């Protein structure tokens, strides 16, 4: 969800790199941006000098436009340079969609957390699984119509298939690891909520955090309940991640995010995101005080409008459930039953 950028955040690079170009954000650290065919229309990628080549953090989605964007870089600012290794921050296709293609092209290894690698591998091996039971019943039980469920499971999840086959081996990254790239040492941090074991890299020497999607300047990362873990608490996990980042990362660190512009002001932004999610929780409780609500009926409550686009509905519905599950745990909501499906009441 987009919301205003606080004036307290600083943006050292006011404009993103143009197609076919990179911007040097620190000596030997470069930023590129690729287009995405969604409402969130771009993803940021980063390259770090690494011996005779460059280490890549995230890859872009697998579609013709992204492959063409890579060819433009290889023919332009990266001409004659090889990719020495790839780091995937998390399993979402806009971040590792081209990992297999690039690893094969450069004979480069892929480093990820184990959870994220296995999730990416599972989706690639069995992309139709999400359309089967019990996932279909999961969405129907929370108030989605049969038509909306079919749209969500069909067109809405199509983006999950926009990946090349990942490498059959990987290098595992874990929290508190030290990762040396060229002459730099990065501390590996992991977080959750947006994805289960999301990797971030912090360089104390550069006072810089490669943050992936865990904290963004202009939008709140999607935090969703997934059908395979219907009682999960991704929002609680995400809020704990933000608190850990506030405690670990200096206030003046440069944050290199997966979307939007690089910024300074992590602690301020984390507080904004925490307040943003609490405001959503409050809106849900107020709606449930008026009358019992299904999760589907609460989507327009927290987003301020109906969601018709199938791709957006996947994220909006999952996000509504994330807030619901967190408030059930906190005993701010209780679950009832109506002919429309499971319904929530204010506790």
Image: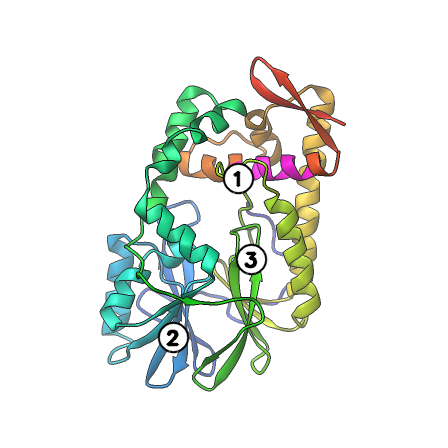
Q: Indicate which label's residue lies in the foreground, 3 or 1.
A: 1
The question of residue 323 being in magenta is answered with yes
Circle 1 sits on which residue? Answer: 229
- In the image, residue 287 sits, relative to residue 280, either above or below, namely above
Q: Main secondary structure of the magenta part?
A: helix
Quarter of the rendering occupied by the N terminus: top right
Q: Is residue 192 left or right of residue 41?
A: right
Q: CA distance from mark 3 to mark 1?
A: 20 Å
* 1 or 2: tag closer to the N-terminus: 2
Image x and y of residue 80, in percent: 24, 81
Q: Secondary structure at mark 2?
A: strand
Cβ atoms under marks 3 and 2 closer than 8 Å: no
Residue at screen point 61% across, 55% down: 5
Q: Is residue 257 left or right of residue 81?
A: right
* 3 or 2: tag closer to the N-terminus: 2
- In the image, residue 168 sits, relative to residue 229, either above or below, namely below
Camera-side residue of 332 and 113: 113
Q: Is residue 92 visible?
A: no
- In the image, residue 113 sits, relative to residue 131, either above or below, namely below
Q: Which residues are magenta?
A: 318-327
Image x and y of residue 53, in percent: 33, 81
Circle 2 sits on which residue? Answer: 55
Circle 3 sits on which residue? Answer: 214
Quarter of the rendering occupied by the C terminus: top right
Q: Secondary structure at mark 1?
A: loop
């Amino acid at each position: 969800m987009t919301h205003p950028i606080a004036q307290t955040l600083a943006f050292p690079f006011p404009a993103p790199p143009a197609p076919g170009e990179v911007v040097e954000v620190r000596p030997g650290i470069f930023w590129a941006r690729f287009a995405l065919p969604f409402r969130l229309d771009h993803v940021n990628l980063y390259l770090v000098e690494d011996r005779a080549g460059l280490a890549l953090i995230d890859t872009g989605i697998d579609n013709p436009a992204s492959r063409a964007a890579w060819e433009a870089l290889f023919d332009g600012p990266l001409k004659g340079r090889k990719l020495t290794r790839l780091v995937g921050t998390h399993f979402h296709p806009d971040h590792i969609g081209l990992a297999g293609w690039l690893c094969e092209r450069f004979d480069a290894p892929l480093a990820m957390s184990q959870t994220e690698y296995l999730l990416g591998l599972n989706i690639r091996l069995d992309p139709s699984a999400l359309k089967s039971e019990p996932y279909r019943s999961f969405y129907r039980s929370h108030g989605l119509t049969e038509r909306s469920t079919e749209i969500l499971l069909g067109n809405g999840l199509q983006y999950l298939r926009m990946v090349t086959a990942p490498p059959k081996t990987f290098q595992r990254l874990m929290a508190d690891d030290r990762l040396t790239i060229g002459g730099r040492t990065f501390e590996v941090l992991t977080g959750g909520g947006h994805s289960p074991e999301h990797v971030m890299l912090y360089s104390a020497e550069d006072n810089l955090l490669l943050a992936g999607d865990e904290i963004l300047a202009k939008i709140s990362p999607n935090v969703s309940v997934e059908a395979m873990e219907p009682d999960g608490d991704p929002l609680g996990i995400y809020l704990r991640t933000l608190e850990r980042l506030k405690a670990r990362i200096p206030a003046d660190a440069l944050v290199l995010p997966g979307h939007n512009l690089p910024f300074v002001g992590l602690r301020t932004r984390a507080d904004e995101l925490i307040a943003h999610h609490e405001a959503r929780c409050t809106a849900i409780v107020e709606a449930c005080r008026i009358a019992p609500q299904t999760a589907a009926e609460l989507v327009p409550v927290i987003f301020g409008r109906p969601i018709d686009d199938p791709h957006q509905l996947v994220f909006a519905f999952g996000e509504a459930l994330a807030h619901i599950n967190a408030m059930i745990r906190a005993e701010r909501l209780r679950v009832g039953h109506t002919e429309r499906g499971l319904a929530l009441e204010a506790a």
